[in-house]
Image (spheres, grey):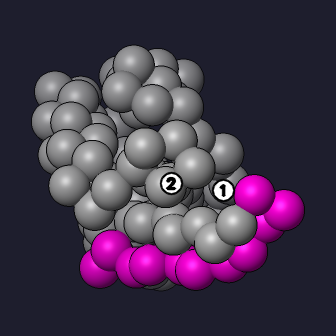
Amino acid sequence: MFVRTLVFDQISDSRFSGSSQELDRLSGDVRAALSTLPGVTVQTDEPRVVNFSTEEGKVQSWRQRFSVQKNCVKTTWNDVRVAVNAVKSAKYEFVNKHAL
């Protein structure tokens, strides 16, 4: 069975003094914020590193993908976005995935 799933990345970027430690902190804070919402299930992928170049030089970006599902009507998708944005805003996308 497929379930509506909110997907987003948390990103820490060397252009803005980011690091893998900052990504760990951000991810922990997002998980903690989401854990306060009833009926929410969170799954995270392994952190990954993306390297690319800009006009200013080489950039290292640390990223972790979150997949969030909810199984009750008490918690709204807006509640989920507010909890995540309280830590650091993200670009959101809805996809259909198997239940987590």
Residue 56 x/y as whole percent = 75, 58
Q: Element at badge 1?
A: strand
Q: At 23% from the left edge and 29% from the top edge, which residue is drawn?
A: 33
- Magenta region: which residues? 45-56
The vertical placement of 51 against 9, above or below, is below
Which numbered circle lies on residue 13?
2
Can see residue 31? Answer: no
Q: Is residue 54 magenta?
A: yes
Which numbered circle lies on residue 94?
1
Q: At 58% from the left edge and 80% from the top edge, which residue is drawn?
A: 51
Q: Element at badge 2?
A: strand
The vertical placement of 65 against 8, above or below, is below
| Circle 2 crowding by C-alpha within 10 Å: few under 14, some 14–19, many from 20 | some
Q: At 84% from the left edge and 62% from the top edge, which residue is drawn?
A: 55
Q: At 20% from the left edge and 55% from the top edge, which residue is drawn?
A: 21
Q: Dividing the picture into quarters, in which one does residue 53 lie?
A: bottom right
